[in-house]
Amino acid sequence: MAGDWNPDQYLKFAEERTQPCRDLAARIAVPQVRTVIDLGCGPGNSTQVLAQRWPDAQITALDSDTTMINVAIESNPRGRWITGDISKWAAGEPPNATAQKSAETAAENILPEDSANERYDIVFSNAALQWLHEHSTLFPQLFSHVAPGGALAFQIPSSQDRPAYRLLREMAASIGWRKWFPSGRVRTWHAHDWEFYYDLLAPLASRVDIWLTEYFHVMPDAESIVEWYRATGMRPYLTPIAEEIDREKFVAEYTDKIRAAYPPRSDGHILFPFLRIFVVAYR
């Protein structure tokens, strides 16, 4: 199915997707970290960063996609693994299921029934919360899961107004593709400006660190930018298109537009800028 998360597609740019996670983890200043939860762990690249940053901590990882979390389990031998929805977890609802690991370590991964009400020294999320809605409710709920002296730390993309996403919206609204998107709009990821997250969390926190980083990824060609988005931002656009041949036509047209929007530099490579918001809110 076109809407399923694809770990192989996602990990084609593992280094570029993991570097913001490393940058966020490095900035967290919590003196004693015993428990960490990784929300939206995906294929486990962020969970590995957290395990390296806090090797003595109990790491819990949650993701809604079973394919992603199974890949994460294979590459990460330690920790607890939950298949569940972040919004429901934030609201205190029990997870849907506990993912199983290898037989010799499965016993240590059985979660208590009230796991959704646990507090953690670090509640962490790397590029996942933008897929959820009602941020004004979600983020205070996430902060409520932070233990005293701990922190909520997350990063989300802030590039929805850049050409790559604007072109997708324009295509969805165009005559040639409108039949797949009757309203001309697609329910995709979203993020507010940095001011929103500061104003929302500052009254709850003892301190909020917030910053923006723009990464300039060096890509060999326009096709590479398209491959980047096929794993994430293009998914809501490809999912409604019923036939594979039509999906490939959509991708081909989008590739032509990307090629025009991101011309090569003097060495033939393309600089692909990607802006992200980083927040660490301390309890």
Image (cartoon, rainbow, N blue to C red):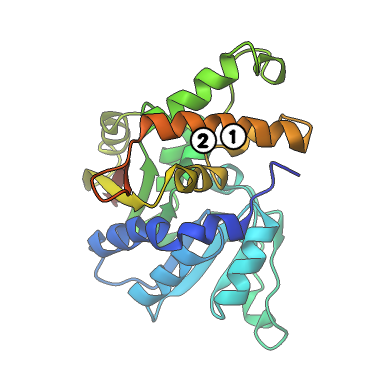
Is 4 positioned to the left or the right of 126 in the image?
right
Q: Quadrant of the N terminus?
A: top right
Is the residue marked by circle 2 packed among few (<14), some (14-19), or many (20+) residues within 10 Å?
A: some
The residue nearer to you, when weighing 235 against 155, is 235
Number of numbered discs on residues: 2
Apparent side of residue 268 relative to residue 168 in the rendered image (left or right): left
Q: Amino acid at mark 1?
A: Ala
Residue 161 placed where, x, y %? 37, 26
- Above or below residue 135? Residue 279 is below
Image location of residue 74, percent across then percent down: 62, 75
Question: Which mark, residue 242?
Answer: none
Residue 150 in the image: x percent, y percent? Answer: 32, 59
Q: Is residue 185 visible?
A: no
Label 2: element kind? helix
Amino acid identity at mark 2: Thr
In depth, the one of 126 and 1 nearer the eye is: 1
Reading the image, the residue beneath label 2 is: 255
At label 1, counting other C-alpha atoms closer than 10 Å, the crowd grade (few under 14, some 14-19, many 20 or more) is some
Q: Is residue 25 visible?
A: yes
Measured from the top left, where is residue 180 in percent x and y?
Answer: 71, 21
Distance from the alpha carbon under mark 2 to that under mark 1: 5 Å
Point 69% across, 58% down: residue: 66
When the figure is inspected, residue 251 is found, relative to residue 269, above or below; the finding is: above
Name the residue at 23% across, 46% down.
266
Look at 58% across and 71% down and name the residue there.
80
Q: Where is mark 1, residue-wise?
A: 252
Q: Seen in the image, is 99 located left or right of residue 28?
A: right
Instruction: Tell me: 78 left or right of 221.
Output: right
Q: Secondary structure under badge 1?
A: helix
> For the point 57% across and 42% down, which residue is it?
87
In contact (CB < 8 Å): disc 2 and disc 1: yes
